[in-house]
Image (cartoon, rainbow, N blue to C red):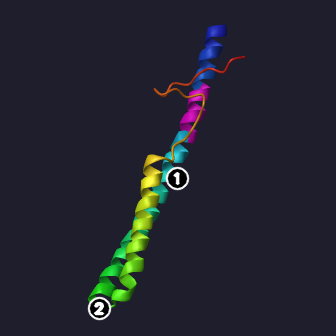
Amino acid sequence: MNVLSEKREQHAVRHRAGRGRTAVEQARLILLVMINVAQLWILAATVEAALGANYRVLLPLVAATFVCWLITLSIVLWWRPVSRRHTSTGYVRLQKR
């Protein structure tokens, strides 16, 4: 009986942790898509300015693209869910009672 209840508890903990990780991954994906759309808009404005010989706005547009790139890089590399109960292999540690 005790072993069965521990297994159920482990499954419930993994299930809750999985939902949280899924939500974080979905939020990261949505942010990346939004930044990608913004970069496409900036690219269209840059091409339009270059074809219209309006070279004054090119530097701010290139700077905006660089900022979008830095934000994307930070989302991909550093925004990860942090949990002290997860090990490096993804298993859930049981809490000490």
Mark found first going from the N terminus, 1 or 2: 1
- Provide residue 12's location: percent of width, then percent of height: 61, 27
Task: Estimate how packed mark 2 is, as few (under 14), some (14 to 19) or many (20 or more) residues with alpha carbons within 10 Å.
Answer: few
Residue 21 drawn above or below residue 5: below
- Provide residue 68's location: percent of width, then percent of height: 43, 65
Residue 50 drawn above or below residue 7: below
Instruction: Specify the amino acid type for callout 2.
Output: Ala
- Provide residue 61's location: percent of width, then percent of height: 40, 77
78 left or right of 93 in image: left
Residue at label 2?
53
The image quadrant of residue 97 is: top right
Could you tell me how far apart the alpha carbons at marks 1 and 2 are, in whole angstroms?
39 Å
Q: Which residue shows up at 49% across the image and 52% down it?
A: 28
- Provide residue 80's location: percent of width, then percent of height: 51, 43
Q: Which residues are magenta?
A: 12-20
Viewer-proximal residue, 57 or 10?
A: 57
37 left or right of 16 in image: left
The image quadrant of residue 93 is: top right
Viewer-proximal residue, 8 or 44?
A: 44
Farthest residue in the right direction?
97
